[in-house]
Image (cartoon, grey):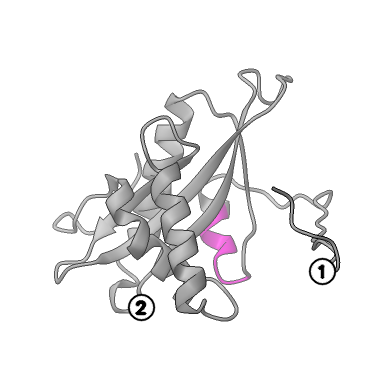
């Protein structure tokens, strides 16, 4: 794995369910356009903790901050698809969050966590990788092999508030 972090920097490690709170915090504070309130943070943390368990669809690598908490994280969700030439095992991943606390930036942590995650996912048979990149983060992703895809489209649909929620 190519890593630009200093040799004395903490190494990325595989995240556990116990890291869900800090991963949710990093995502909320440094990725989303508006930070989440406590209720949404708790909801995300609880769901992520379940999904980070062995056999879950969430996979993440983190760098611990020396004073506690996390300095950086890279999180992806594996999807099972029908096999095709670009994903012969039928496995794809959506990189959902790559974040570094500002106090720990410019040390190569984002590169290190994402590189560790990509290497681990490749060993698991994942061949298709997707993510949304901000203008500032695109160079990092391009250095790791990602390329823009103009075919990507997106839609968000919310349920009709007049209908009762599904059971």
Residue 161 falls in image quadrant? bottom right
Query: Image check: 5 left or right of 90?
Result: left
Q: Nearer the viewer, residue 140 or 64?
A: 64
Tell me residue 58's x, y (percent): 47, 42
Q: Earlier in the sequence, mark 1 or mark 2?
A: 2
Question: In the picture shown, does residue 91 fall above or below 32?
Answer: above
Residue tagged 2: 102
**Which quarter of the rendering shows the N terminus?**
top left
Q: Are marks 1 and 2 in contact (CB under 8 Å)?
A: no
Q: Which residues are magenta?
A: 135-141
Tell me residue 154's x, y (percent): 80, 57
Tell me residue 80's x, y (percent): 63, 28
Determine if residue 4 is in view.
no
Residue tagged 1: 161
- Spatial CA distance of label 1 from label 2 is 39 Å
The residue drawn where x is 33% and y is 60% is 109
Q: Nearer the viewer, residue 150 or 48?
A: 48
Determine if residue 119 is in view.
yes
The residue drawn where x is 30% and y is 66% is 107
The numbered dot on residue 17 is none
């Amino acid at each position: 794995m190519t890593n630009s972090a200093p040799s004395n920097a903490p190494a990325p490690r595989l995240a556990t369910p116990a890291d869900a709170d800090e991963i949710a915090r990093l995502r909320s504070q440094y990725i989303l356009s508006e930070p989440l309130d406590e209720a949404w943070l708790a909801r995300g943390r609880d769901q992520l903790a379940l999904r980070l368990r062995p056999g879950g669809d969430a996979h993440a690598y983190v760098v611990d901050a020396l004073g506690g908490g996390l300095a950086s994280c890279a999180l992806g969700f594996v999807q099972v698809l029908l096999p095709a030439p670009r994903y012969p095992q039928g496995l794809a991943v959506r990189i959902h969050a790559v974040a570094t606390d500002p106090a720990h930036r410019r040390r190569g942590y984002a590169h290190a966590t994402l590189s560790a995650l990509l290497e681990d996912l490749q060993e698991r048979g994942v061949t298709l990788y997707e993510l949304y990149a901000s203008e500032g983060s695109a160079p990092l992703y391009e250095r790791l092999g990602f390329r823009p895809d103009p075919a990507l489209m997106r839609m968000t649909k919310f349920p009709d508030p007049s209908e009762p929620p599904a059971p």
